[in-house]
Image (cartoon, grey):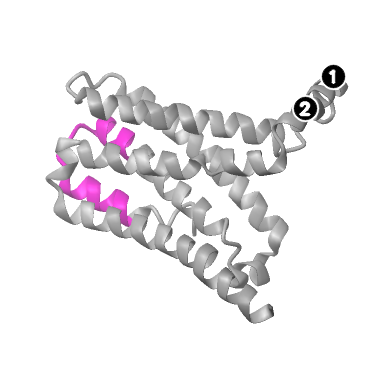
Amino acid sequence: MILLVLPLPLVLLLNLTLLEPTRTLLGYDFGIIAYVWWLSIVLLSTKPQWLDRRIGLPAMHFVHGMLGVLASVLICFHAIISLSMATVDLWVKNIGNIAWHLSVFELLFAVFFLSGVFNRWPLVARLKQKLQVVFKHQVSVWIHRFNFVAIGLIWWHVHLFGRITNLTSFLILFDAYTVVTIGFYIWKHFIADQSERLTTD
C-alpha cells in the first residue's frame, strides 16, 4: 500500500493536468513517489501501534529502511532526467540538487552506521567501531533527522517550479500530504508522548 497506493493520487493528478513529454512526466513522477515515500518514513518513525500489532516492529524497521533506499534511488533518476531541462530556474535546480545530495549522504550514512552490511569485513567493521565513538547514537539520530531538511527543501523546490505552481489542485493535495504528515509527527512526538509521560509520572 505504501509503495503503490499512497503516491498514486499525486502522480495521476499531475499526469492528467500537466502537458509535458512522457520522459519529462516520468522524471516528475519519480520525484513525487520519492517525496511521498520520505513522508511515509516520517510516519513510520512514529511507530504506529496499529501497524506494530499488524506486522511487528522488525518488519516496520525493514520497510523504513527499504523505503529510504528506494526513495534515494528514485530521486537519483529524477535528478538525472531533470539535468537535461535547461529551462528550469537556477534556484529550482540548486535547491533540488541540495536535497538530492543530502538524501544520498543520508543513505550512505545509514547503510554504513545503522546496518550490519559491512560487519562481515573485519577491517571495515573495526573502522566503523572507531568512527562510532565520534558518531555516537544521539549524533546519528540527529543526522537521520536531516530527512526533515530534505523534505523542506523538496517542498520549496516544488513551490518554486513555475510549471507546477499553476496546478492549483495538485499543489493543494501536495501540501495536504505534507501538512498531515508533519502535523502527525509533531503531535505524536511532542504532544501525545509528553502526555503519556505526565500520566505515567
Query: Which amino acid type corresponds to the residue marked 2 in the rendered image?
Result: Lys
> x, y percentage for residue 108?
61, 29
Label 1 crowd bin: few (<14), some (14–19), many (20+), radius 10 Å: few
Q: Are marks 1 and 2 in contact (CB under 8 Å)?
A: no
* Residue under the point 48% across and 54% down: 40
| Residue furthest out toward the right | 122
The residue pinned by badge 2 equals 128
Disc 1 element: helix
Q: Nearer the viewer, mark 1 or mark 2?
A: 2
Q: CA distance from mark 1 to mark 2?
A: 9 Å
Q: Is 23 contained in the magenta span?
A: yes
Magenta segment: 9-29
Is 138 on the left or on the right of 70, as rendered?
right
Label 2 crowd bin: few (<14), some (14–19), many (20+), radius 10 Å: some
* Residue under the point 19% across and 49% down: 16
* Residue under the point 49% across and 40% down: 71
Disc 2 element: helix
Query: Which amino acid type corresponds to the residue marked 1 in the rendered image?
Result: Leu
Is 135 on the left or on the right of 193, as rendered?
right
> x, y percentage for residue 88?
20, 25
N-terminal label among 1 and 2: 1
The circle drawn on residue 161 is: none
Q: Is 116 contained in the magenta span?
A: no
> x, y percentage for residue 68?
55, 42
> x, y percentage for residue 49?
62, 71
Magenta segment, principal secondary structure? helix
Give the image quarter of residue 199.
Answer: bottom right
* Residue under the point 15% across and 37% down: 163
The residue pinned by badge 1 equals 123
| Above or below for 177 versus 51 | above
Q: Nearer the viewer, residue 137 or 4?
A: 137
